[in-house]
Every structure is written in structure tokens, then in C-alpha cells.
């Protein structure tokens, strides 16, 4: 659980320190007990030599007390000398009262000396209350067998060992400190390399596949660097393929959406007219025959319009690719305007479309396209205003004017773009294709669309008529509602 919350470098660092400390601690324990045994064996041999010396001094007639003092002086440390009878009774001790001492028959060094002539032991002394090293030898004392025993305090014997151990411990601590510094430096290097890897992966995740990345701390990190760069190149290639595929998919979806939107927008008006006339005929069975015939005629006209639109839809979808050209013919603009106005007033029954034309104008253009232009412009004018809409034209230009809210200056250039709508008119389901279609059709006829609008005053949309247009029936003039 702890490793899950640590960085790789921290895991390495902790494991390195634990391994180093563990190794040194284990080695220290082994060295400690090894040196201790060596020291005890060395002092035991020294006591054996000192036993021979003390015995020689006794043989020379010196007392035990004097021999013990002389030996202690020579060795430079206190030396305890004890003489024990064969039954274990203490006969002499230079550091304790023999009368108060216990019987020593069961002491290990005494038992060994009586049995083998020499014995040694390391144990706790109940008499002097400390740990001691003992060496005992079987000798003759006043013609009888006795055991001569020498001993020193274990603390005294281990004093040199303690100094040595302190020096060893300091060396180990120095080794731990050096190991700590080295492992810390290695940890920092690993942290730096891992930081580079992390930063590079973040750049790749952000699709910056050409981000710089170098790693050289070790061969493993160099390998990781090369593999990550290869991975980034593959991801970049995959991203490019994905973008191309997405672009194609979006284009296909947009084209489908444009076709569907165009169908919805362009079929709306004639379908609405047909439904209006049909509902009237079905609901009012007593309509005069002349009116019924007129309504049926309008239904037929709008049906034909739908048919014409269907025929032209494939043409509209190919306009931008320049696969088709306008089908030019001569026709009366008045007829188109009057028909469009009449149809749209069926959609807006409480509104008037006032057509002002001083002459009957014949133009040379694509009739279906110009119908689409006129219907779209009058329809927009009705949508975005509440009063009457004026359509004025002569042999030079045609203008459609409404007295609505107007268009903001910043939006005039935008409204002729595909799919652009003024947001507040959310009821308009035209998807913003109407004016885009108008503008494109007029450009196919080398005509520019002009929009003049002021907030609170209304909007006027104007375009010039084809230069080949003619005027007929000059006797008819005037202004009249459709």
C-alpha cells in the first residue's frame, strides 16, 4: 500500500538506504561477535601465560599476594588471584574475603582444571558482581594439589574492543552518509528523467507531437525516449488520418444538411399554400364554383412549383461545384412578383404585399432561380416586420422594403452567409439558407445584392435587373396591392 503512494525514485531511494543500512547492521553484528570472541580468546591466552608466571614466582618462594600485585603492575590492569582447594574451598583471594566466599567446586573453570589440568570460562561472578574471564590451572601448593585461578573483568578486557568498535561504527556511519548522498543524487537524476517523460507525455496528450524530448541518464531512459518518440509519430499519423476522415465526414454531413434544409425551406411556402387552399375547399362546401376553380388553379400552380423545385434541387446542390449553368429565358418579372406575393399572403393572411411597378418588365434570366430569389426576399421581409411589405421595380432594379426592426450594421455582412440566423428569431426554421441561396443565384447572373438597414426603421433589399431586360405594355401603370 505504501509503494502505491510513492514515486519510483523514492522507492529506489528507500530500498537503497534500507539495503545499505541492513547490510551494515548485519555486518556490524557479525564483526562485533567475531571480535568479541577473538578478544576473549586473546585474554584467555594471556591469563594462561600469567598463570605460568605467577606459578613461577610462587615456586621462587614469593607469596600469592605479592605475586598477584607484581603481575597486575606488569600488565597494567587489576588481576584477581584465587587459590582453591581440590574440594572447592577458597584458600586465597586478593580481592575478596575467602571466609565469605562460596564453595567453588562446581565452577566450570575449576572443574575443567581438576579434570584436565587447565580450564577457562567467561561468566558472571557472584563474589565481585561483574562479568569476568577466568583461567584456572592445577598446581602443587604445600605439597598438595590445588587450583590456581586468575581472572580479569570482562569490561577491562573489552575496553580496547570498545575503542575499536567505536571506530568501526564511525566508519559504518560514514559509509551510510556517503550512501545517502549518492542515493539522493541518483534519486534526483531519476526524478529529472521521469519529469521529462511526464512533461513529454503531457505534450503528446495535448497533441503536440513535435515537442522536444531528450533522456540520457541511463540506457533504459534512452530506450524509453526512442520508444515514446516512435509512439508520438504513430499518433501524429493517426491524428492526421483521423482529421482527414473527420473533415470528409463533416463535409458529407454538411452537404446532406444543406440539402435537407433547402428542401424544408423551399417547399414550405408552396406546401403551405396548397394546404391552405385545400383546407378551405374541404371546410366550405358552398364556395362558388368560380372561387373553387380559382383555388384549384392555385393548388395546381403550387404543385407545379413543387415539381419544378424538385427538378431544380439537384441543380442547387451542384451550384457551388459549377457543374451547371443557369437556364436562361425571357419572362415577365411582374408575373413572378405577383405570384410570390399572392402565395405569401396566404401564409400571412393579415399582411399585405404592395407591388409598385410602372411597367411590365420582361427579363432574361433563369426563371426558377429568380422565383426563388423573389420568394425568399419577400418571405424574409414578412417574417422580420409587422407592417406592409413594398416591392418596387422597373427595368433597372427591384427593391423589397419592410418597416420592421432593421438589422444591426455588424450583421449585414453576416446574414447572407450560409446557416446564419439572427438569434432572437428562433421561430424561423429556414436554417439561414435563404439569403445565401439568393446571393449565390444573383452572382450566377452577375448581379450583386445590396442591403440597406437601420435599427427601428426597417430594411431595403435591392438588386439590379439583368441588362437585357425590356419594357412592354407602357400604357399600364400605377400602384396596387397584389
Image: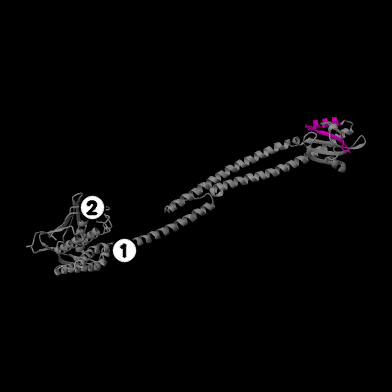
**Residue 431 found in image quarter:** bottom left
Color scheme of the displayed model:
one colour
Element type where label 1 sits in the image: helix
Q: Position of residue 71 (x, y in %)?
A: 82, 32
Task: Report, in whole angstroms, how far the alpha carbon at label 1 lies from the one at label 2.
Answer: 27 Å
- State the residue position of label 1: 256
Q: Which residue is mark 2?
A: 412
Evaluate whether residue 7 shows in this view. no
State how many labels appear: 2
Q: Residue at x 33, y 63 (%)?
A: 252
Q: Can you say whether 122 is above or below 395 in the image?
A: above
Query: Most extreme residue toward the left, as rendered?
Result: 475
Disc 2 on helix, strand or loop? helix
Is 48 in front, or is 257? 257
Magenta segment, which residues? 64-90
The answer to whether the residue labelled 1 contacts the one labelled 2, judged by CB atoms less than 8 Å apart, is: no
Residue in front for this viewpoint, 333 or 219: 333
Amino acid at each position: 500500500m505504501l509503494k502505491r503512494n510513492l514515486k519510483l525514485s523514492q522507492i529506489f531511494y528507500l530500498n537503497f538506504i534500507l539495503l545499505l543500512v541492513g547490510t551494515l547492521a548485519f555486518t556490524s553484528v557479525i564483526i562485533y561477535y567475531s571480535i568479541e570472541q577473538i578478544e576473549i580468546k586473546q585474554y584467555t591466552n594471556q591469563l594462561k601465560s600469567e598463570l605460568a608466571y605467577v606459578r613461577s614466582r610462587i615456586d621462587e618462594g614469593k607469596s600469592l599476594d605479592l605475586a598477584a600485585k607484581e603481575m597486575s603492575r606488569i600488565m597494567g590492569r587489576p588481576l584477581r588471584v584465587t587459590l582453591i582447594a581440590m574440594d572447592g574451598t577458597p584458600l586465597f583471594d586478593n580481592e575478596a574475603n575467602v571466609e565469605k566466599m562460596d564453595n567453588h567446586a562446581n565452577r566450570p573453570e575449576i572443574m575443567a582444571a581438576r579434570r584436565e589440568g587447565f580450564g577457562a570460562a567467561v561468566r558472571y561472578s557472584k563474589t565481585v558482581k561483574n562479568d569476568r574471564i577466568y583461567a584456572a590451572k592445577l598446581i602443587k601448593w604445600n605439597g598438595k594439589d590445588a587450583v590456581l585461578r586468575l581472572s580479569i573483568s570482562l569490561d577491562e578486557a573489552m575496553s580496547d574492543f570498545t575503542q575499536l568498535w567505536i571506530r568501526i561504527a564511525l566508519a559504518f556511519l560514514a559509509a551510510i552518509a556517503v550512501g545517502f548522498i549518492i542515493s539522493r543524487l541518483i534519486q534526483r537524476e531519476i526524478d529529472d528523467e521521469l519529469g521529462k517523460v511526464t512533461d513529454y507525455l503531457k505534450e503528446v496528450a495535448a497533441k503536440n507531437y513535435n515537442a522536444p524530448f531528450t533522456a540520457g541518464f541511463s540506457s533504459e531512459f534512452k530506450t524509453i525516449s526512442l520508444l515514446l518518440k516512435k509512439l508520438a509519430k504513430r499518433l501524429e499519423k493517426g491524428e492526421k488520418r483521423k482529421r482527414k476522415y473527420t473533415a470528409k465526414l463533416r463535409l458529407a454531413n454538411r452537404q446532406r444538411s444543406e440539402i435537407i434544409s433547402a428542401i424544408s425551406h423551399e417547399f414550405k411556402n408552396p406546401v403551405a399554400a396548397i394546404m391552405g387552399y385545400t383546407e378551405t375547399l374541404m371546410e366550405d362546401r358552398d364556395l362558388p364554383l368560380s372561387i373553387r376553380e380559382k383555388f384549384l388553379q392555385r393548388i395546381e400552380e403550387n404543385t407545379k412549383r413543387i415539381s419544378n423545385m424538385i427538378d431544380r434541387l439537384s441543380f442547387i446542390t451542384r451550384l457551388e461545384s459549377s457543374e451547371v449553368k443557369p437556364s436562361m429565358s425571357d419572362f415577365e418579372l411582374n408575373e413572378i412578383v405577383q405570384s410570390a406575393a399572392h402565395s405569401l399572403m396566404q401564409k400571412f393572411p393579415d399582411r399585405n404585399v404592395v407591388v409598385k411597378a410602372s411597367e411590365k418588365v420582361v427579363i432574361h434570366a433563369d426563371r426558377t432561380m429568380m422565383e426563388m430569389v423573389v420568394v425568399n426576399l419577400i418571405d424574409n421581409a414578412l417574417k422580420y416586420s409587422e407592417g406592409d411589405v413594398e416591392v418596387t421595380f422597373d427595368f433597372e432594379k427591384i427593391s423589397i422594403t419592410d418597416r420592421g426592426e432593421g438589422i444591426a450594421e455588424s450583421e449585414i455582412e453576416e446574414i447572407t452567409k450560409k446557416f446564419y440566423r439572427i438569434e432572437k428569431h428562433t421561430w424561423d426554421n429556414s436554417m439561414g439558407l435563404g439569403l445565401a441561396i439568393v446571393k449565390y443565384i444573383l452572382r450566377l447572373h452577375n448581379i450583386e445584392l445590396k442591403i440597406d438597414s437601420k435599427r427601428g426603421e426597417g430594411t431595403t433589399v435591392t438588386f439590379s435587373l439583368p441588362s437585357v431586360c425590356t419594357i412592354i405594355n407602357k400604357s399600364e401603370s400605377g400602384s396596387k396591392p397584389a
